[in-house]
Amino acid sequence: MLSCGVTVDQISKIRIKTTTKILFVDAAPARILVEALNAEGDTFSTLSEIPVAWGLSHTGEGRPLRIVPFEQSTYDAPAEIVALENTKKKGYIILVEGVQTGSATLTAKFVDAHLKNIPSHKLDLTVVANLLLLPARDLFLPLNAVVPFQVHIVKQSSTEMVAMPSSSYYLKVDSENICSLDKMTSSIRALARGRTDIHLFSHNVDVKAKAGVRPPSTSISVVDPETIQWVVSENNNWLLETGTRYQLCILLLDSQGNSMFISDNLRFDSIIPSDYFEVHSTSKNQTHFEVTPKKVGKVVLRSRFTAVLDEIGKEQQTTEKVFGEQPVQIVDPIQITPSEAVFPYIARRKISFPLKVSSLIIPSTFFFYYTHQT
């Protein structure tokens, strides 16, 4: 036998309940509900079909939020809410969607005459854009390096670039003694050794007044480079085959081994021996290459950090003490003889055939054999 106790009481007050006070522009709507409590603070199980008047107020231009009917969304609504919406009313659950950045106040109160003396309840909500500041990773820069930043906004179905400068968003550097900011190009230039941060703010949201709102930021450290490291595609294996195309690039490292950001205004002197490589393409600052080995042998790749372009485009020479070398061994492709083997199928009998591998450089014990079908 099961039993259930039922208590009938008067509503003393209401409160708006939500899982978040921060909503994103063009994101899925947030479910917000109102709860009713008695004089002892106990929460009523349901408000059923009691209509609720929901209101939105805001300051400034534009409307940050809008209330979305359940019938215009993919959310399932309780039967009593559907019944209220069919009569152009709202119930204890609503959907709220961010329209543009800003702040708004959501108010809930009862509309029935016998409940009109119950105080309304208000909730402050903040709408922010789901923004990306790129590059987003921690940056390590040499002096005078220039880094252009991009702003992207994440929406439900896509990611869009925001044209900067913008009437809605702006960039700010904590210490312009370390990095200067060009607002027209959204780029920073490293001026002095040290650490600072760049932040992306919205003109419509005061992050200092809104706890929990953190603007997109990138950490910047201006340090001295120490060495250069070469990197090759194909798992960074420097045993290269003739006739195979590879991507080569160089990394600029500081004394802690951090990979530094190589901006377009840095200049390098990189040497790839033309006797051993056919160079298909080279980046302007000689940091990225597309090559094909054409001759068997051992060779050394070299690169040196030589200069930085200043504000007027003039090359400022470095000490040229930052350099890197990479030994490379070039071999002909491995060949298996014969290239094709055909076996008759004989039930309950295994057939074997010896295969020969030809390589002038690599010992046969270094080979790993496998088949696509076993």
Image (cartoon, rainbow, N blue to C red):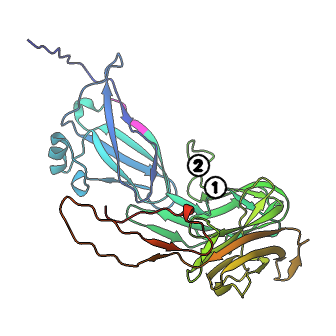
Q: Which residues are magenta?
A: 117-122
Secondary structure of the magenta portion, mostly? loop
Disc 1, SS? strand
At label 1, the amino acid type is Ser
Disc 2, SS? loop
Q: Residue at x 62, y 65 (%)?
A: 236
Question: For residue 119: magenta?
Answer: yes
Q: Disc 1 designates what residue?
A: 217
Instruction: Give x and y (percent) for residue 287.
Output: 71, 76
Q: Is residue 74 above or below residue 271?
A: above
Who is closer to the viewer here, 353 or 334?
353
Q: Residue 78, which numbered label? A: none
Pointers 1 and 2 in contact (C-beta within 8 Å):
yes
Please tell me in which quadrant of the rendered image residue 65 appears: bottom left
Q: Residue at x 82, y 74 (%)?
A: 304
Q: Residue 214, which numbered label? A: 2
Q: State which quarter of the image contains the N terminus.
A: top left
